Image: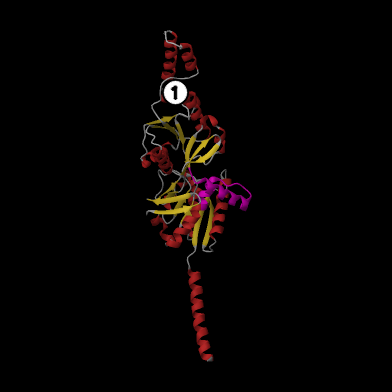
Amino acid sequence: MIKLIKIIYFIFLIFYILFFQAVNAQEKIKIGLLVPMTGSNKELGNSIIKAVRLAVKDIDNDLIEIFPKDTATKANQTLKSAFELSEIGVKVVIGPIFHESLDYLDEMKDLTFLSLTNKTLDLPKNVISAGINSTSQFNTIKRFLENNQIQKTIFLTPIQDYEFEVKRGMKNSKIKIYKDYEYNTEPTKLTKQIEEITNYRIRKKNLEDEIKRIKNSNELNKEKKIKRLEKRYTLGGLNFDAVVIADFDESLKSVSTSLLYTDVLPRNKYFITLNQWFDESLLNETDIQPLYYPSINKENFDSYKIKYFNAFNKDPNHLSLLSYDLVGLVYYLSINSDVKNLNKIFKKKNSFKGKIGVFDIKNNKIYHRLNFYKIEDRKLIKIF
């Protein structure tokens, strides 16, 4: 009997040792993090580091290891930090944030970088753009236009460093373009260009001519007709139904104001713009409302902000939400495949649901299924 007990104990001990070794032999999920920890963008970097820490805590798995490294928002420092991550066995990296930090990363062929940039042009083959790119935004705008049977949409794009990204998004989404214009953001040039785009001077002259014609006519009630016309700024229809303004912040407001000046009003024509990250200052711009734009899920974003504030007593940068979701994405992909093969996974079709919404992974790119919102009467309203 004693021998039998010893045999059973010995067998149990062997199984325990084997199980313990198997658990410990599980490969750690090493995630590199390339963010500015020094320099002018260090606050943004700190916000992203905190978001990543929050994501790891929420996932609650000891297999995840995070290795933050400084980019200083410089391409050479980014490469140096990426090499250090490679030396300790990291295969996937969240970051860098900015497109200009990507220049030399094609030298690190054994690493896959999930950059927070929303630019997709001229990326190294081992870099995946995880930002809210223009294709994702135009896909959503296209859905809105089709749902509302809007046939004639003009597109206004500033001559800026992201101009070609906007053009790429328009092309990729196959959105229906009535007319496409580029404009100079310098105020005096902008006003003149908007006047030309909207045929303002012709419409203004039409009004002057019509008032003059009625004054010289024998029409009945011509005084009333003249008074009605004198309340207007222009006469003659516009040959478009909606305008998409690919701009942000004060420049967006300037373009919208120029449209108002040329008698293009949002109650008559749809004013649509790109993702504004719920810029609250737009709520007060009642003259340019209703204003429409695509963005991430607002309810999820607000929930994340509360979670972040409760953890760190600070408000998060909106980019930190991207990094929070990317930790979850890497973890999800890692438990379903070998972490060393993540670069191959990003070449295949895949989807992942995070706080920001649903990611669609395809051809080494991440696309976002966005919601669509309207600002009207100082309120933000979800369309879909």
Amino acid under disc 1: Glu
User: Which secondary structure class fits the magenta region best?
Assistant: helix
- Rendered position, 59 above or below 290: below
Instruction: Residue at 52%, 45% (x, y): give it.
Output: 298
Residue pushed farthest bottom? 1
Instruction: Residue at 56%, 38% (x, y): give it.
Output: 280
Horizontal side, residue 310 vs residue 354: left or right: right
Residue pushed farthest front? 220
Examine the structure image and report whether residue 26 is included in the region drawn in magenta.
no
Magenta extent: 295-324
Q: Quadrant of residue 201?
A: top left
Residue 130 placement (x, y as % from top left): 46, 48
Q: Classify mark 1: residues with Cα within 10 Å, few (<14), some (14-19) or many (20+).
A: some
- Rendered position, 366 above or below 245: below
Q: Quadrant of residue 336?
A: bottom left
- The scheme the figure's colours follow is secondary structure
Q: Nearer the viewer, residue 313 or 202?
A: 202
Residue 358 placement (x, y as % from top left): 45, 50
Q: Nearer the viewer, residue 28 or 355?
A: 355
Res. 316 in view: yes
Residue 119 placement (x, y as % from top left): 44, 43
Instruction: Residue at 53%, 39% (x, y): give it.
Output: 380
- Rendered position, 62 above or below 373: below
Residue 306 placement (x, y as % from top left): 59, 49
* Helix, strand or loop under label 1: helix
Res. 73 in view: no
Residue indicated by mark 1: 195
